[in-house]
Image (tube, rainbow, N blue to C red):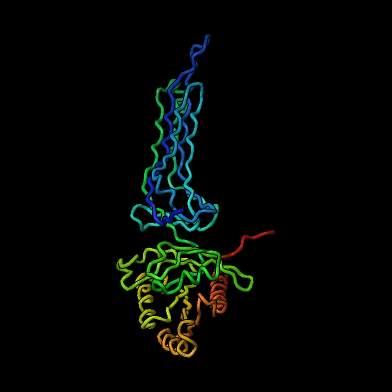
Amino acid sequence: MKFLDLAKVHIRSGAGGNGCISFRREKYIEFGGPDGGDGGAGGSVWAEAVDGLNTLIDFRYQQHFFAKNGQPGMGRQRTGKDGADIVLRVPVGTEILDEDQETVIADMTEVGQRVELARGGNGGWGNLHFKSSTNQAPRRANPGQEGVERTIWLRLKLIADVGLLGLPNAGKSTFLAATSNARPKIADYPFTTLHPNLGVVGVDDVEFVVADIPGLIEGASEGRGLGDIFLGHVERCAVLLHLVDATADDVVADYRTVVDEIEAYGDILASKPRVTVLNKVDALGPELSELVRDDLAAAVGGPVLMMSGVAHEGVTEVLRALRARIDADRLRRRDDGRDDAPWRP
């Protein structure tokens, strides 16, 4: 299945049915009076977050979603049938934006969450509604209300606990493959990863989700390389894992390159906690690895872990450090009242 994280969709709710002008006509009843029924309501357009989807590829092949119109009213006080609703099934983590791609209409973060995007028009009243003591034979009825037509954007932001960051060939996909059942493409050339990958990682009987995105390069915020279009997938993460290639000519410069691009992206990522790891230390040896780590720690201003994803050295320590940050974030959310479990008797 191909990965698609942005889609443009045209939606339209159904129009309401027109009211009916009708009079009762039966044998031996001279003045039957009005009996026109109301029109049916038009169908609405809904969005629903469903489980089992992780891409918006379905919206590449269908971009127009139109709900059914309501049927007009009929004689003998018969109301027209309501138009059928239409539901857009989207993955969890999908943001629904207005046509300007800035105004957020809804953020679908939970399975089963439903949002009405366009309400169907009301059905018109038949002439039965307009009878009175002074107007016993009304010859008027209301037309149905028009539906709502709009253009929206769907933007998928994967929901993960950890986001992987680093330059191309920093070992992000190797780390994901070594710690989970995910099988991302791994090769010895830059930009092997062309779309985000998710993997479920476990340590000490605790599981969390890791998201791997394509590597960043200098100028990614200006569109160089694959740009920073995939950084939105790590906006929801509790912690960022920054991998630095130990075999690079200048590990400090590589570290600063990624950090600068994160800061250029915005405060959403710049303010997130980060765990910095020196990867591929098996290629340097213990002594040289210590020297490189000290230089990187001085630039980071904090501790730097060492790891080799290929040799599985130091992987457990890195996972435990990530778990500690994730637990701290969940505790903070609970204290803020944003992650409370529903009350149960």
Asked whether 280 or 71 is in front, the reply is 280
Residue 32: x %, y % from top left = 50, 16
Picture residue at 48% right of the left edge, 44% below the top: 87
The quarter holding residue 343 reads: bottom right
Look at 32% across and 73% down and name the residue there: 218
Residue 337 seen in the current view: no
Q: Quadrant of residue 111?
A: bottom right
- Residue 33 against residue 175 in the figure, above or below: above
How many numbered marks does the figure carry?
Answer: 0
Q: Residue furthest top?
A: 28
User: Looking at the image, is 56 positioned above or below residue 159?
Assistant: above
Q: Is residue 99 visible?
A: yes
The image position of residue 20, as x and y in percent, is 44, 25
Of residues 116 and 128, which is closer to you in this image? 116
Residue 181 location (% of width, % of height): 55, 64
Measured from the top left, where is residue 204 in percent x and y? 63, 73
Above or below, comparing residue 211 to residue 298 in the picture: above
Residue sitting nearer the eye, 63 or 138: 63
**Considering the image in quadrants, where does the C terminus appear?**
bottom right
